[in-house]
Amino acid sequence: MRMQKKYYFLLIFCVSFYFLIFDTILGLFQLLNIIQRGEGILITEEG
């Protein structure tokens, strides 16, 4: 019973870690896309 709990904890930990890395990489790609389009991140004046 104790080993099964530990196994589930490890599985959930690995899955969350994977999603964290995946989300970070997606965010970086979106940030690069915004920078390449020439839109300022902090400058939001549009006329």
Image (cartoon, helix red, strand yellow):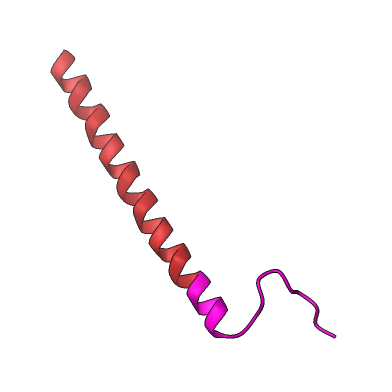
Left or right of 42, for residue 35: left
The quadrant in which the C terminus is found is bottom right
Please give the name of the residue rendered at 53% of the width and 83% of the height, measured from the top-left corner: 36
Number of disc labels: 0
Q: Which residues are magenta?
A: 31-47
- What's the residue at 42%, 65% (across, down)? 26
Question: Residue, x 42% and y 57% (percent of image)?
Answer: 24
In the displayed structure, would residue 17 be above or below residue 2?
A: below
Q: Compare residues 45 and 9 and report the one nearer the observer.
A: 45
**Where's the N terminus, which quadrant?**
top left
- Residue displayed at 52% across by 70% down: 31
Can you give x and y, in whole percent of width and height, for residue 32 in the image?
Answer: 49, 75
Q: Position of residue 42 (x, y in %)?
A: 70, 69
Outermost residue, top side: 1
Q: Quadrant of residue 35?
A: bottom right
Seen in the picture, residue 15 relative to 5 is either above or below; the reply is: below
